[in-house]
Image (tube, helix red, strand yellow):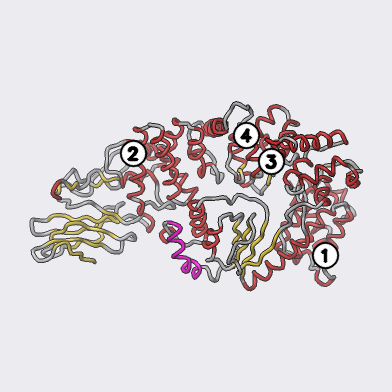
Amino acid sequence: MEQAIVEDEYPYVLECEKYYEIIVKNIGRKWLALGNEVCKDHATYCYEVMDSFYTFESRASYMLYYGKVVNKTFKELLEIMIKIGCRDIAEQLQYLLQHIPIISNHHNVLYKEFTKNIGKQLKRIDQDGGHILIHGGVGSGNISDFQLFLKLNHLLLDLEWGEDNLPDDLETFKKKVQYFHKGIENCNTLFIFDDIRKEHHYEFLDFVKKSIVTSQYSKPQNMDKYEYYKMPEQFTFDNALQVLAQHQNDSNLPKSRQNREISRVIEVCKNHPSAIDIISGLHLRNVKDWQQVASIIDNQAQNNESSTTDFKFHRIFDLSIQQLDKNDRHLFRSLGAFKKLPIPIDSIQSLWKCSQSETVSLLKKFHQKSLLRYREENSYSSSCCILTEVMVDFLQQPLQSDQSISDYNKILNQALIHGYAHRCERKWFTHPDDGYFYQYLIFHVVQAEDVVSLEEIVRDFDWITNKLRSCKLAKELYSDLQKCLDYFYFNGEIEKWFNIQELYQLLNTNAPYLHIKTMDIVQFLLISNRKDNWINKQAMKLAELNGKNQDNDYWKATGWKITGNNNEIKQTDCKWIDRKIIHTGHRSIIDSSNTRDIINCSSPKYGDLRIVHANTIDLKQYSITVRHYLSSKIILEITPANHAIQSTKISANGSLIAYAYADVQISDALGVF
């Protein structure tokens, strides 16, 4: 039985500050009905309100104040909403008093008692900490160990753990768990880990104080620290009717227990709510329509070769899709190109080559048919659609019987890449960062076997810059480059493999200097690349272009020390070009004739670069100089006595320098200043 809230527990509307935005958003389009109820003279200034306030939420807020509803109790507000025919809104607002997020009734069956119990546990966790494990439906958690590692690193970045302190792999993460726990022991954040499918992944979630874990599998062993809640495994007959009733106008539907076809369909599908949902979207109008659905299920059950549950549902999915017109069918089926994740609207717009309004309109149409979930957020860029795993599996099945799944998957991905290319006119770095494009573009290009696009993208340093900024982790870029290397190697594209291998090695070797938040990738390559290769030419080209368009200054090393056979030192043209405006000229700040070794610099993460190098004064004397790279001003200059300087180093923050030296008594000792 639902627990009632006594009169004294209802706060005044004005006291519900943290829920006020949710209240007006829920009232939204019903602002006019609310005004008619609470404002006697509402009709006289209705048009003035419409002219003064442009959103439904702002109009609803005005009515709450003008009608003095803000001075009423929350219970009185609920009674008003019921009176104007908005019982559904009243029920949604009721959950605010239980501190439970609003859950839409549309396309959902709400287990009130189950939700209330979770709410009670959340209150307890909020005060004392703790963990909840919910056995529920399928999400998108079937991820590899590497993907889990990336997600955990992203989590640590969000917690401002520090880029330099991130673990290198899952094993390192496990060793550092106690430090992570100590770092967030006073953190009140509730962590939600959705759809954990691999039992050994639980051991990497121990560092948080408060968490909810969902899984489609039963409770693993040794999980005593979790409060365990199990969702109902299947719909009851009444649950199924509740979903079906959302789309049915048939007043006889509640009596459908006596209807053999309806009872048969519900009995077969009640273990799979998504199938019931799809059937509700068919808008079945009469007994004949129900007989058609029942016939599909019965016929497939009699077919020994195709009697799997998923296949029966695929036939139902196909029946729903066939109700669409030809163009809409094609567009919906094309969504099979995406991964089993929430799909941002920007990426769908690119795939469909539609306008923003056309894309949203189509998604809402598919949502009404229960083919997908359209989740509308405050901003267009945050909105997305969600397909069930079973639906994605169906959309990835070939339409032609003589076509293989791999060939059809290639066609789907080619359409997606063509859509992306069309929208950004093959200037890949200009596509909106929607949280999907930069994360998974390389995956889709490889699946499409599009060699031309693959080479274009990984040679586009502007795209690489945006990739790093979007993903925040250099390891995600390395993973993409590795996919490219594997593809080029196994397809005999040796020259392309060699070129990308150069870039991959360069990025890996100089990773300590690659700080994503502050580093321009063009500047990074000009610093670190020692060869006159395609990387250098591309970086110089972009530096010149950026210099003209953005008035950027770039600098680079034009020479390096080379160690030959027997470790002898060969001098190249060791000039260090500083504050170099490439499109107008450059100047050297260090004379090549007396530069002793490879020049090192501090990290750009800690501010302006400091450059350290050793100079030869004579055969017995050496000096070490630290310069500010923009002004060329000498910050420090020392002359160690009787030390033949072999090499110099500088710390990342530029506060320490070190040098290796040799003399008649000591070889390769290290002096630190």
Q: Is residue 385 visible?
A: no
What residue would you read off at disc 3? 308
Depth order, front residue of 137/50: 137
Q: Dot 1 lies on which element?
A: loop
Which quarter of the figure has residue 251?
A: top right
Q: Main secondary structure of the magenta part?
A: helix
The vertical placement of 233 against 557, above or below, is below
Whether tag 4 and tag 1 are in contact, CB under 8 A, the answer is no
Q: CA distance from mark 2 to mark 4?
A: 41 Å
Closer to the chain start, of discs 1 and 3, is: 1
What residue would you read off at disc 1? 2
Mark nearest the camera among 1 and 3 is: 3
Mark nearest the camera among 4 and 1 is: 4
Task: Name the residue: 40% across, 37% down.
Answer: 459
Q: Which residues are magenta?
A: 169-183
Q: Which mark is residue 397?
A: 4
The vertical placement of 191 against 487, above or below, is below
Q: Dot 3 lies on which element?
A: loop
Q: CA distance from mark 2 to mark 1?
A: 67 Å
Q: Dot 4 lies on which element?
A: loop
Residue 586, given in percent of the width and then of the height, sits at 27, 42
